[in-house]
Image (tube, rainbow, N blue to C red):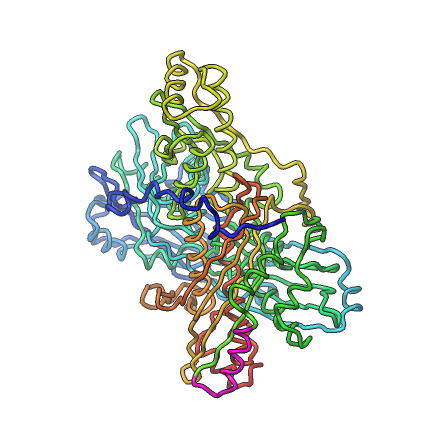
Amino acid sequence: MSLTLMKQRPDQQAATPSRVDGVAKVRGVALYVDDLPCADVIYGATVRTTEAGGTLQEVAFDPAIDWSEFVVVTARDIPGRNAVKLLEDDQVVLVDHAFRHAGEAVVLLAHADQEKLRKALKGVSLVELPNPSPIFDIDAALAAQQEIIPGNIYTDYLLDRGNVAEGEHLAGVVIEERFLTPSQEQLYIEPQGMLAHLQKDGSILVEGSMQCPYYVLDALVQCLGMDKDHLRVVQSTTGGAFGGKEDYPSVIACHAALLALKAGGRPVKLVYERGEDLRVTPKRHPSRTLIRLGANKAGELQFIDMDFAIDGGAYRTLSPVVLSRGVIHAPGPYKCPHIRVRGRAVATNHPPFGAFRGFGAPQSIFAMEVAMDRLAGKLAMDPAELRRINLLRTGDVNPTGDVMGADCFAHAALDAALEHTHYYHRLAEYRAWNAAGHQTRKGIGLATFAHGAGFTGNGELYLASRVSLQALANGHVEILCSNTEMGQGAATTLVQIAADALGLPMDCVHLAQADTSRVPNSGPTVASRTCMVVGDLIQKAAGQLLQRLRETAALAASHDAQSFAAACARLCAAAGDTLVTAQYQPLADMRWDEQAFLGRAYASYAWAAYIAEVEVDVLTLATRVRDFTAVQEIGNAVHPVIVQGQIEGGVAQGIGYALYEDVLWNERGVMANDRLTNYIIPTSADLGFIHVVLLEGGLGAGPKGAKGVGELPMDGPAPAIVNAIQQALDIDIRQIPVRPEMLLELTVSGGN
């Protein structure tokens, strides 16, 4: 199968229309939740626990404050269940007695005067009986000397194929390592926020910044004890998410709605300040990986044995599905007859960890890819050559037992990356530079990986997503789906897919606001599924609409916008049904065993090879990324500029993960560096040149063979950068971020 380089595509200019949300955002007229006009609004705030787990003994209110001026909500005011609707209802909406981490919500306050509200927060005192022995370490949690839940294990998975003992017997070279990855903050531009209104008919409207409106709706149903017909959830313009607005909006929406219920009809706006957002909302799961790799003298992998554990924090939230993806991606894009990956999500007294771009894969892929370089060193083999020997090809069996079809481009991605970077020339050049004794050391490192798009296994079947198209009398078409635009370009991509399928200009197609009273549940905006899964549903719905217009409104087989509009007018005048709906149907060969982790885990994989070139100052040990090349096969770039932006943004976050971003915890398990002045992320000056190369095989499960790309670019930067630093300094690195202090310690100790 030949691949097409995006930069050579003749239709690239036609495939890059302006963003449909661009003008409003550039002009500053897009309304984020804190901009929404609302008469007589009052503002919400939260009183939180301070200890790392324990029991709440008393809530005391300062008698010097006139509390009758305030709306005050406690657990006693919850009309439904005091539980946040997620995978398991173990997290309370408001603490009434027991709690598991510092920062849990206990009391909600609201007032029209924000200064009075800030003072009132200091007037509420909590008497807490603290947990005497909080747990903050993964291995300490696994030792289970102090239990948060039985065994401190939320989920225990095993991917086991072949026989590792047999693989050990066949392996001539074995390496064994321990790797750590840290938490990471999503750092979306707009903090979490919700606006709740109690309507005159007793229903509740919640508007806010979110990824998954139907998640929020389900949480409100459970917390408020109301049916869905009396609840409406609307997504306002959302200023970034990266997974951070998948599950937590359910919490803050419940809080805002509870205040609105008690506020006597006044709307309540609850928007976090940055410090509070950083301290209490979910971040990327920290991980610990024990890994053993064995290969024969020719470099062929004989066994992969991994113990992969993630810190789930104080409640289960999304940890099981994050762990699942991490386990599946852990063995990498390699063929190996004997694989065992044990994955565990453990309970600690940190605030819960949650979704973040990559969703478990960056943690396990980091361990695998750095270990591959370590194995190459022990084999006295070039790291690129070791990967070439072991990368999957069509007909090979992948780690979950699925036979790879024609859509396997691991080798093509590696070849393109090596060619684009002149890898071997650079390698020789940097070795000569380092041998010459300059004040800097240079290195080049790589990572090869794949990322599955869409929900894992049977997830999409369970979601049963639906998308509708509505033909209007003026010939325009409205897309009705619950997937959200959060800065990633989905609004443009989905409109582009519909317009292309209908044969219409893009200005004739509109994406409806995500409003649960109007749009069907098309699933959450997560898992790199929007373009591939939802886009495919839009394309199918467009085919249904064209068929209906041809059968009932005399639309010609060949049409333009004018004749299409005339057909729509005829259909509407005849009182015909102008709404069509497509529902997800699984692929015929989509068979997945959730217990054994065997079968086809994803409808499509995107394939990638990333190469980092770094320079390390010998005196300061500061690392600078000189060049970064990201090569990925993504099926079909529906909108190449948006795809390139996704890749560049993911690489930037990956550079931060590798070198700069480090969540520091205080003695109570709370983020200590909760300011933008001390939680360091890379700026444009820190990124170097990012080269994006897109290969298009056209075999993905989405429109015209498209695949998901949102999460893919987060997986490769950290291991590629670490491998480059290791090569430059001839040391072994076992954790990120790679700060100068760590490099000083490693160079002084000899790199071990």
- Residue 366: name its quadrant: bottom right
- Front residue of 139/535: it is 535
Residue at 37% in and 13% down: 573
Asked if the magenta segment contains residue 655, the reply would be no
Q: Is residue 357 left or right of residue 685?
A: right
- In this picture, is 600 found above or below 497? below
Residue at 42% in and 57% down: 649
If the image is split into quadrants, where does the C terminus sit? Answer: bottom right
- Front residue of 183/138: it is 183
Q: Is residue 192 left or right of residue 219?
A: left
Q: Is residue 263 visible?
A: yes
Q: Is residue 83 visible?
A: no
Q: Position of residue 49 (x, y in %)?
A: 39, 57
Asked if the magenta segment contains residue 432, the reply would be yes
Toward the bottom, the furthest residue is 437
What span is colored magenta in the figure? Answer: 425-439
- Front residue of 545/121: it is 545
- Residue 36: name its quadrant: top left
Residue at 43% in and 71% down: 626
Q: Is residue 89 left or right of residue 281?
A: right
Q: Is residue 206 left or right of residue 98?
A: left
Q: Position of residue 146 (x, y in %)?
A: 56, 63
Q: Position of residue 644 (x, y in %)?
A: 44, 53
Q: Position of residue 384 (x, y in %)?
A: 61, 68
The overriding secondary structure of the stretch rendered in magenta is helix
